[in-house]
Amino acid sequence: MANHASADKRHRQSERRRLHNKYYAKTTRNAIKALRNTTDKEAAEASAPKVYSMIDKLAKINVIHKNKAANLKSGLAVHINNL
């Protein structure tokens, strides 16, 4: 239980942000998984920019670290090139 009004507000804000971040992180993880499971090179190349954009947005708002974003995008590029 919060002892101050500011602590109560901070708790409300952090809860709201946690749910927001959780939704976008999960959506991005599903998009990455779908791209990795794709065996068609043309389809993978078509969906790659959208997935890269999602990863960049997560890094921009500090849901994931920028180096993790770079590693994810690099791994996806290697997967697409190997198709």
Image: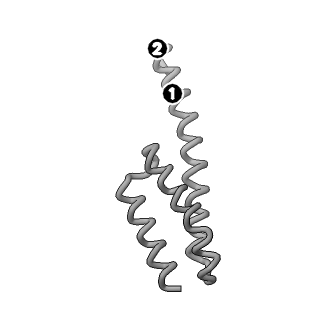
Residue that numbered label 1 is attached to:
11
Q: CA distance from mark 1 to mark 2?
A: 11 Å
Residue that numbered label 2 is attached to:
4
Front-most of 66 and 23?
A: 66
Residue at point 54%, 44% (across, down): 21
The answer to whether 26 is drawn above or below residue 79 in the figure is above
The answer to whether 77 is drawn above or below residue 5 in the figure is below
Residue 72, percent across and down?
Answer: 44, 65
Q: Identify the mark nearer the N-term, 1 or 2.
A: 2
Residue 78, percent across and down?
Answer: 44, 78
Task: Look at the numbered disc 1 and give the secondary structure of its residue.
Answer: helix
Amino acid found under the numbered disc labelled 2:
His
Residue 26, percent across and down?
Answer: 58, 55
Residue 60, percent across and down?
Answer: 44, 46
Residue at point 55%, 27% (across, down): 12
Task: Look at the numbered disc 2 and give the secondary structure of its residue.
Answer: loop
Amino acid found under the numbered disc labelled 1:
His
Q: Residues within 10 Å of mark 2 (few under 14, many from 20)?
A: few
Q: Residues within 10 Å of mark 1 (few under 14, many from 20)?
A: some
User: Which residue is farthest left?
Assistant: 67
Residue at point 53%, 85% (across, down): 83
